[in-house]
Image (spheres, grey):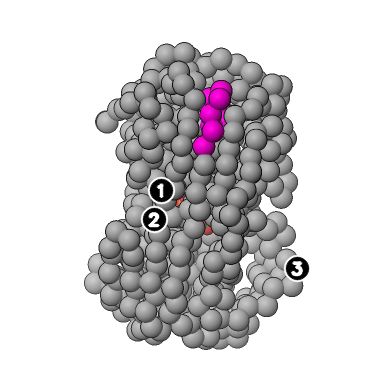
Amino acid sequence: MAKRTFHPVNSPLTGELTVPGDKSISHRAVIFGSLAEGTTEITHFLHGEDCLRTIDAFRAMGVQIEVNEEKIIVHGKGASALEEPSRPINLGNSGTTARLLLGVLAGLPHHFVLYGDESLSRRPMDRVTVPLRQMGAEIDGRSDGKLLPLAIRGGQLQPISFEPPVKSAQVKSCVLLAGLLADGQTVITEKTPTRNHTETMLEGFGAKLDIQGDVISINGKQALKGTNVEVPGDISSAAFFAAAAALVPGSSLLLKRVGLNPTRTGILEVLKNMGVNLTILNEEVKGGEALGDIQIDYAPLKGTIIAGDLVPRLIDELPIVALLATQAEGETRIRDAEELRYKETDRIAAVTNTLKALGATVKPTEDGMIIQGKTPLRGGNTDSFGDHRIGMMAAIASLITEGEVTLTNPDCINISYPAFFNHLEKVTAVHS
Ligand code: SPQ
């Protein structure tokens, strides 16, 4: 297994970075572009492994998709033109591809077989197969359709009224996509708001949604029209460098054109609560998505509490927040984050094991963790557990450890941030 060694830095991080395109928005742009009639051009697309899986899935269904470094061009012919693939679809590591795609396939009169890597094959799929079966899709698979591989035969769907049993944008999006292809009106009641890129983009592609408080209604059989999408920088990727600046005394970093959709900006609130100096500049809205530059300046950190509705607004940033908490004065508590256990790895276990190996005082709980700061970190051996966010957290931790940090399986960062190690080198002159 590949390994990579990192050395602590002895000077502040400075400069500016443009982080790669948002993963959630990149997936959705390909999905909606493929369902739409006409051409969709996507700029600042994330060329990460997960989003390439989504492209591969729609190519397997006959969609012509041109992939260039600076632009993706999707030649959509409408949902009814999607063909039955001649091969099983490999979803790799991507939970978003799996769950959103199932929503689309449920509404198509074909047979599909889906499989993923070891990690994805452990992640729960019943959260989407249960409502899709209720709508009329035939789904068969391991553990009665709870786990990949799955076979699905879609077709005529009935609309449903649905309240997701878990706080998940993927579940909401899956049912919205199936609802778009169903006959009649599908209604989703979402008690805890989650990222709303699907709703925003549906409107951008010309669909009508009715959103009243926590109730979202969509009429089926609406035609989508191809459009252009400029993907903002991924706030979940930016969070690693925001944290790096917050950890290394004297640092000052400018993170450019980062997505600032309020359903994703929980991390900025937490950074401010912890004492970080943070300023938003050049804010604008493009295609319904807010974006702007984030200026981060080092300041001493203090502990905080993260719970309730805030959690889905920063769920993917919790590993890096846990690292910050080890350097904050006092206690940090993370609660209501049981969903962390169902990610690429059990992130409650992976974060606590990694930080403990580096000398931190962290206690896992059922639905989160309790971190005592401020604790000096030492070097050591860490493992990404095949999870890009755990790998990047360990690499950022190495900036402030007393010795070097070795990371096993570092390449999984390619899932969401292929340029991560280059960017790390760019902002840390002496880092290797
Ligand atoms: O796609 P995947 O593997 O599920 O990716 C993750 C990540 O860390 O990148 C989660 F592991 O992001 C999810 C996120 O946690 C992406 C996502 C989306 O695009 O809709 C929503 C969140 O998942 P969920 O289960 O809360 O809906």
The kind of residue on which mark 1 rests is Ser
- Quadrant for the C terminus in the image: top left
**Magenta segment includes 250:** yes
Q: Position of residue 367 (x, y in %)?
A: 65, 38
* Image position of 100 with respect to 347: above or below: below
How many other residues sit within 10 Å of disc 1, few (<14), some (14-19) or many (≥20)?
many
Q: Secondary structure under badge 3?
A: loop
Asked whether the viewer can see residue 385, the reply is no
Query: Is residue 49 visible in the rendered structure shown here?
Result: yes
Indicate the amino acid at tag 2: Leu
Q: Which residues are magenta?
A: 245-253
**Residue that numbered label 3 is attached to:** 213
Q: Do labels 1 and 2 touch, CB within 8 Å?
A: yes
Quadrant for the N terminus, please: top left
Tell me the residue at 48%/69% (across/down): 103
CA–CA distance between discs 3 and 1? 32 Å
Question: In the image, residue 61 lies at what x, y percent?
Answer: 31, 74
First of labels 3, 1 by sequence position? 3
Decide: few, some or many residues near mark 2? Use Cα within 10 Å; few <14, some 14-19, many ≥20.
Answer: many
Instruction: Compute the Cα span from label 1 to label 2.
Output: 7 Å
Query: Nearer the N terminus, badge 2 or badge 3?
Result: 2
Q: Nearer the viewer, residue 135 or 189?
A: 189
Whether ligand 1 has any atom under 8 Å from the Cβ at mark 3 is answered as no
334 is higher (above) or lower (below) than 374? below
Between 401 and 230, the one nearer to me in the picture: 230
Count of all numbered marks drawn on residues in the image? 3
User: Residue drawn at (25%, 67%), measured in percent from left and top?
Assistant: 87
- Give, as a three-letter code, the residue at label 3: Gly
Q: Which residue is mark 2?
A: 46
User: Residue 13: x and y, percent?
Assistant: 48, 29
